[in-house]
Each structure stands twice: as C-alpha cells, then as structure tokens.
Image (cartoon, helix red, strand yellow):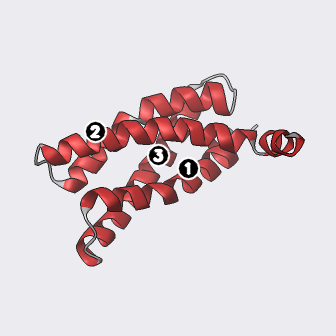
C-alpha cells in the first residue's frame, strides 16, 4: 500500500492529467461517434469532437492538474498546444483510415493515445511551466 502511495505522489500530476484526459476523451469520442452516425465526414467530425473537450480541458488542467491561476497568455498557449495536437491528430487519423484502411472510430482511439503524451509534455513544459 505504501508503494502505491509513493508511486501516486511521484506521478500525481500525470495521473491527474490522465483523469482530465479521460473526461475530455469521453466527451470527444461520444461527439465523434454521433457525428459519424449523422454522416459527417470523419475529419470534420474529429475536428468538431476535439473542440468539444477543449474548454473543459483548459479549465480542469489549470485548476486541478497544474493548479495555476488562469491567464490570457496561458489560455493562448493551451489553445496553441491543442491546435497543434489537433493537426497531428488529423494527419495520423487520415493515415490510419486512408492509407492503412483502419475504420474511423478505432483509428481515432489509436491516435488519442499519442495525443495524451504529446499534450501532457507540452502543457507541463510550456503552457503551465512554473
């Protein structure tokens, strides 16, 4: 039990980031699923779904994960990180769907795993740098 506590303390920030990420990912994947079923093209559906979790992600990341007061400059950095992440998301999604012929929904799930680490590292080292 003590080992788990030490492990959590050492990685608490990343664990909290993952909790926020699960919330955002759930929102995004639900929106993506419904948009695909509404015959929205998959790249547009991914973009709209990605934006659905953006505000929630910023509010929870600033207050729960990195515990910082929100500023306009910080918000711009956060948005920049997530726009770059969205572009990478769309590129990888396109490759998985159109090149490797993976179905749209599983492809989005695969791409999401990459985005978790990308977003955490950039937000920790740049957006919410102490």
On screen, residue 118 above or below 78: below
* Label 1: few (<14), some (14–19) or many (≥20) C-alpha neighbours in 10 Å: some
Q: Nearer the viewer, residue 126 or 89?
A: 89
Residue 90 visible here: no
Residue at image mark 2: 31
Say whether residue 51 is visible.
yes
Of all residues, the one furthest to the front in this rendering is 1
Query: Residues under labels 3 and 1: Cα distance?
Result: 7 Å
Residue at far bottom of view? 99
| Residue 78 in the image, given as x and y percentages of width and height | 53, 39
Label 3 SS:
helix
For the point 51% across and 36% down, the residue is: 76
Q: Name the element at disc 1.
A: helix
Question: Which corner quadrant of the image does residue 1 belong to?
Answer: top right
Nearest the camera: 105 or 86? Answer: 105
Q: Which mark is residue 73?
A: none
**Depth-wise, is mark 3 or mark 2 nearer the camera?**
2
Mark 3–mark 2 Cα distance, whole angstroms, equals: 17 Å
Q: Left or right: where does residue 77 sit relative to residue 27?
A: right
The residue that mark 3 highlights is 82
Q: Earlier in the sequence, mark 1 or mark 2?
A: 2
Quarter of image, res 50:
top left
Q: Are marks 3 and 1 in contact (CB under 8 Å)?
A: yes
Q: Earlier in the sequence, mark 3 or mark 1?
A: 3
Q: Which residue is mark 1?
A: 119
Q: Nearer the viewer, residue 57 or 33?
A: 33
The picture places residue 113, in percent across and down from the top left corner, at 50, 57
């Amino acid at each position: 039990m003590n080992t788990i506590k030490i492990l959590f303390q050492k990685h608490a920030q990343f664990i909290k980031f993952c909790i926020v990420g699960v919330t955002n990912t759930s929102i995004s994947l639900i929106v993506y699923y419904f948009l695909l079923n509404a015959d929205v093209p998959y790249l547009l559906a991914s973009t709209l779904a990605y934006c659905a979790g953006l505000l929630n992600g910023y509010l929870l990341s600033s207050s729960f994960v990195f515990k910082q007061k929100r500023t306009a400059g910080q918000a711009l950095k956060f948005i920049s990180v997530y726009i770059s992440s969205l572009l990478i998301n769309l590129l990888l999604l396109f490759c998985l769907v159109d090149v490797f012929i993976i179905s749209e929904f599983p492809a989005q799930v695969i791409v999401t795993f990459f985005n978790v680490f990308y977003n955490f590292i950039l937000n920790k080292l740049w957006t919410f740098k102490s």
